Image (tube, grey):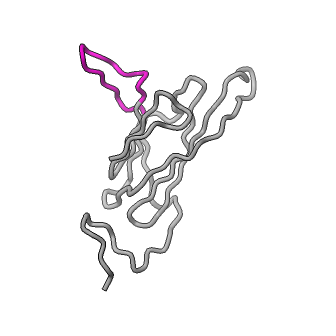
Amino acid sequence: LKCEWMPGSETMVSVVCGTFLKVFDVKRAGSTGKESTARSTTCYTLAYEDVLIRAAVFLSGKVRKSQGPRASNKEVSVKLVLLLDTGRLYTTELRMDSNGDLEDQGESYIECGEDLRFPITGIRRYLGASPSVAG
């Protein structure tokens, strides 16, 4: 489990677990008495259950000004990079509008074929134990 503030946002928190990544918007949080809750606005789920997310990182994004009648608006894009336990590196771009809302709302599936593959010959799959020498 890894929690991290989204770059370029003061209200978005990402939570990475083994099979999914959820983004929560704390400005939309509701409170009842002493407790506050936030529902995820976006969820990226792996399409296959036998693949796990080993690491996730956000690369600082670019700020772009909109074209056209609403040219005063700006858009922030952040690159999400996921390292899967199969040795694949998956990247996608997350965009936030001028209100600080993500363009993608709801649930999206990550297809493992749309990524970069690194050779993992001789590397054992992590099973929660101490690393050992292949043999």
Note whether 72 is above or below 14 in the view shown.
above
Outermost residue to the bottom: 135
Answer with left or right where residue 104 lies relative to residue 130.
Answer: right
Answer with left or right where residue 11 lies relative to residue 46.
Answer: right
Q: How many marks?
A: 0
Is 34 a magenta residue? yes
Q: Looking at the image, which residue is at 30% across and 17% down? A: 31
> Where, by quadrant of the figure, is residue 98 drawn?
top right
> Where, by quadrant of the figure, is residue 52 drawn?
bottom left
> Where, by quadrant of the figure, is residue 126 drawn?
bottom left
Note whether 112 is above or below 8 in the view shown.
below
Q: Quadrant of the C terminus?
A: bottom left
Note whether 2 is above or below 89 in the view shown.
above
Outermost residue to the top: 33
Is 38 a magenta residue? yes
Residue span colored magenta: 25-41
Tell me where residue 64 appears, x and y as whole percent. Answer: 69, 34
Q: Looking at the image, which residue is at 63% across and 31% down? A: 75
Q: Looking at the image, which residue is at 52% across and 60% down? A: 115
Asked whether 73 or 2 is in front, the reply is 2
Tell me where residue 96 appears, x and y as whole percent. Answer: 56, 32
Tell me where residue 32 appears, x and y as whole percent. Answer: 26, 15
Note whether 57 is above or below 66 in the view shown.
below
Q: Looking at the image, which residue is at 52% across and 28% down? A: 101
